[in-house]
Image: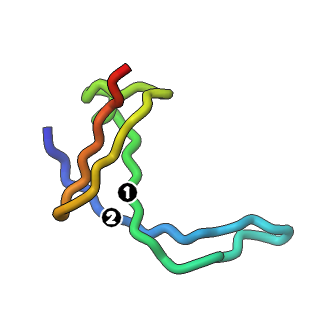
Amino acid sequence: MKRVMSVYYSTDQEYTYGGWFSMGDIKPMIRISNQFLFNSGFRVGDKIEVEYGNNALIIRKCQK
């Protein structure tokens, strides 16, 4: 399966009395939360490993 998604931005934020305040620079973020994960065999609480490099991310479920 393949799915086209977008990279979003995330800022380090901290909540203090009166609201959220930025604590750093804007950073790229990917958030995956849908049936795509479920259909690929991932369940809530599963441990994963992420491999980075060469313009690719590989996400695998850890073997027990």
Residue 38, position in %: x, y? 33, 28
Within 10 angstroms of label 1, few (less than 14), some, or many (20 or more) residues? few
- Going by the numbered disc 2, the residue's amino acid type is Val
Q: Secondary structure at mark 1?
A: loop
Q: Is residue 21 left or right of residue 9?
A: right
Q: Which residue is at 70% across, 75% downward?
A: 21
Q: Quadrant of residue 8?
A: bottom left
- Whether residue 40 sits left or right of residue 49 in the image: it is left
Image quarter (top left, top right, bottom left or bottom right) of the C terminus: top left
Q: Residue furthest right?
A: 17
* Mark before the other along the chain sequence, 2 or 1: 2
Q: Dot 2: few (<14), some (14–19), or many (≥20) neighbours within 10 Å?
A: few
Q: Indicate the secondary structure of the residue bearing disc 2.
A: loop
Give the residue drawn at x 37%, y 57%. 30
- Kindly indicate whether the residue at mark 1 contacts the one at mark 2 (C-beta within 8 angstroms): yes
- Amino acid marked by disc 1: Ile
- Residue at horizontal 19%, vertical 64%? 55
Residue at position x 41%, y 25% from top?
43
Residue carrying label 1: 30
Q: Is residue 33 above or below residue 47?
A: below
- Residue 59 position by quadrant: top left
Q: Nearer the viewer, residue 36 or 29?
A: 29
Image position of 39 (left or right of 19)? left
User: x%, y% of residue 14?
Assistant: 70, 67
Image position of 9 with respect to 34: above or below: below
**Residue where numbered disc 2 is placed:** 7
